[in-house]
Amino acid sequence: MEEVVQLGKGVSFSRMFEALRYDGPGDKIKLPPSSFKELSDEGALDKGPMYFRLSKVRDTVPGATMEQDTEEATCSGVLEFTAREGSAELPPHVWNNLFRSDTPDVPLIEVKYVSLPKGTYAKLKPEGAGFSDLPNHRAVLETALRNHATLSENDIVVVNYGLLQYKLKVLELKPASSVSVLETDVEVDIEGSDSVLDNEENQHVLVPLAIGKVESSVVEEGKFRYYKFSVEESVSEKVASGRANIEVKIDTDASGGDTDIYVSRHPLVFPTQHRHEWSSHEMGSKVLILKPRDSSLVSGVYSIGVYGFKGTSKYQISVAIKDVNSQRIGEHASATGSVDADSVDADSVLCRNCKRHIASRSAHLHEAYCMRHNVACPHDGCGVVLRKEEAADHVHCNKCGRAFQQREMEKHMKVFHEPRQCPCGVVLEKEDMVQHQSSTCPLRLIVCQFCGDTVHAGGEPVDARDRLRNMCEHESICGSRTAPCDSCGRSVMLKEMDIHHIAVHQKS
């Protein structure tokens, strides 16, 4: 590491410790109580936040010369002085940056007190593709850096987004190769990744998909391939009025593989089996029509997740805006000899088998043919009329009552009725899991209305008033912070600011 840090400023502290690992965020280490006394005697506590330069000791043979690896070094802050004597506890960020190649049996490090300048500029580069696809990815990075006291060039910073993890390398810092990021404004540049999309099958990457264009790819069983497309404002008006539909079409070959489609609208970037807005589980090729629940939220960016349900599947995927035909989806022409329900008259009778109104002049002929060739499904609430040779292939789920072909039942039971465990520990079936992860799961991601960060929602608020406001636990706690009122200067809780303005400052 380039030696540009300002050493000690009158504080002399350099000790060798055995490195131990502990789970925690950020870059703050734990030192033994004796270090606190030494630093206090040196006057380090009066100089503000304490920073340390950590370097790996390469040669650990007794009596031999100890060479310090200047390439594998980093800086950190200090969390507390509770480590056992002779050891220093490192969080994953510090440990991974210090021991990048291998970890010795007895990892020894040198911890040296340093004084770091406040950072003014940082350039980072994602190691893989996909980070720039996150909504407000700069805010996500800023949230991750709040747990850090320092940054050093060549460090790898890990950014968590829900269950996803992204790694960014620190390329350049100003005014030094190691800086403090506490109580300072740092200008951040994020360079584009060198990763090629075709080599990112194991990562969460959104491949751009133009409307009307066809993309071909392959997905393996148990994995996702993700795409994104945009709906412009001009098109959204037609979709919102019902004059057009957004259709996602996937054509698969007959190789024995099978896929599922999951679609979401941003800010939900990567739809899964349990976090999505639309889905299709039909076997083989399929068309999924997207009908936004809110007509005012049609335009924007959408994500498509193609999931390999069975085997390795080759497919072609496309998105199109289709005008709605006068004939409704699923509507078929009337059978010959039958009478539409809207045109039933006195000169018609009801067939005892298919329950259709038939013209009287052909009723006997129709009924004889119908009894010989057709059968009505006896399942309560179904009543669909089938050809007798097709009846054996028509089955109903004994849990939800939905009708399927026999070959589709195994997939239906696996997708919809096989219990799944949420990362929070709850075990539910698919439809209940979708509802749980979108509304009640404490690990679901939300954009806090007070801090603007993308965070885990948490459970229900303790305060009943916050529950009535539909706040989550995080928003209840975050909104309890105070800020001065713009009008009167009084300190008011953020979540009470609107009520304060109405009750105190609104003119009647």
Image (cartoon, rainbow, N blue to C red):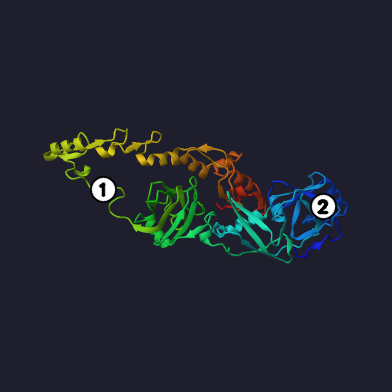
Please name the residue that numbered disc 1 is placed on.
332
Task: Check disc 1 and give the amino acid type.
Answer: His
Q: Nearer the viewer, residue 494 or 376?
A: 376
What's the CA distance linking mark 1 and mark 2? 84 Å
Residue 247 higher or lower than 430, as above or below: below
Left or right position of 38 against 347: right
For label 1, the crowd category at 10 Å Cα-Cα, with few meaning under 14, some 14 to 19 and many 20 or more, is few
Quarter of the picture containing the N terminus is bottom right
Q: Nearer the viewer, residue 239 or 100?
A: 100
Q: Nearer the viewer, residue 232 or 36?
A: 36
**Residue 233 image position (x, y, % from top left):** 43, 61
Labelled disc at residue 441? none
Please name the residue that numbered disc 2 is placed on.
61
Q: Nearer the viewer, residue 487 or 484?
A: 484
Task: Check disc 2 and give the amino acid type.
Answer: Val
**Residue 324 image position (x, y, % from top left):** 32, 55
